[in-house]
Image (spheres, helix red, strand yellow):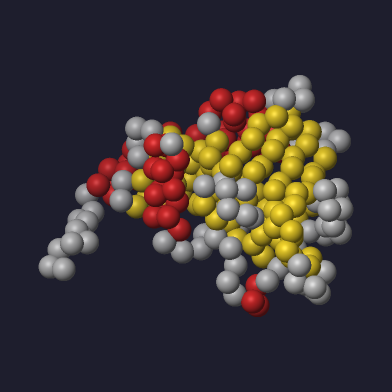
Amino acid sequence: MKTTKILILLILLMCSLGSYCKVKYTIVNNGVILIGTKPRATFFNGSGFMKVNTNNNSLIYSLELYSNGNQMQFALKASLVAAINRKYAFAFPSKSKFLLKLKDDSVIELTSILHKNITDPSQANRCFDSYFPLSMEQLNKIFDGVKKIRVEIITLDRKTDKIVTDYVDLDFNKDKIGKQMKEWYDEIIEEYTENSHSLLSNDANIEKKDIKENF
């Protein structure tokens, strides 16, 4: 619980810096370093409890590391993109579930701790980022291979305005996510090992204002 609260605070802090998706990034602020990977897209295969038409709709995901120099916390960052002008739109519910079925048929269940849903109607095809904390133990299991994932979503029928809590599945003939996550993890650790000390040291020398000063 304590780790989850710390991660929420770190994400909120880094989100305040603005948009930095689509590229690899390293950001340091207030003694916290954030390292993120370039996102990858994968398409839903159309299966799901409500059997909604999910063709050409995709899950965008990437891996992030948050650290204060002593503790490290990883998170899966995900968003949903619905094809423009299609019948359905998607969003993550609060504390949404993300299931990963591994090669040995065991299941890892992740729960989101923060998500930013879309408020701009002009971007109604996009559900903005949701964050799923990952332990090192979970990451090591994922590295061995993932053959299926299931994502809990809210489905909106744009014609009837009906909203249903639902899920969609992604099946893989061969592992994609496990291999990708291992590559990302190695890149993040390399970046962290090479640059975290100097970046955090430089950040520590920056004068920080107390929010209560002269209030």
Q: Residue at x 66, y 59 (%)?
A: 91
Q: Residue at x 64, y 35 (%)?
A: 109
> How many numbered marks, from 0 up?
0
Inspect this view and state whether residue 45 appears: no
Question: Does residue 35 appear left or right of residue 45 in this picture?
Answer: left
Compared to residue 175, the image places residue 85 above or below, namely below
Inspect this view and state whether residue 156 appears: yes
Question: Does residue 49 appear left or right of residue 78 in this picture?
Answer: right
Compared to residue 85, the image places residue 147 above or below, namely above
Q: Residue at x 55, y 60 (%)?
A: 116
Q: Residue furthest left?
A: 214
Q: Residue at x 62, y 48 (%)?
A: 96
Which image quarter holds the C terminus? bottom left
Q: Residue 119: horizontal and vertical position, in percent? A: 58, 71
Compared to residue 3, the image places residue 151 above or below, namely below
Q: Nearer the viewer, residue 38 or 71?
A: 71
Q: Residue 141: horizontal and vertical position, in percent? A: 64, 25
Q: Residue 126: horizontal and vertical position, in percent? A: 67, 65
Which image quarter holds the N terminus? top left
Question: Does residue 150 appear left or right of residue 47 in this picture?
Answer: left
Q: Nearer the viewer, residue 213 or 197?
A: 213
Q: Residue furthest bottom?
A: 122
Q: Please tell me in which quadrant of the rendered image residue 84 appears.
A: bottom right
Q: Residue 152: horizontal and vertical position, in percent? A: 70, 48
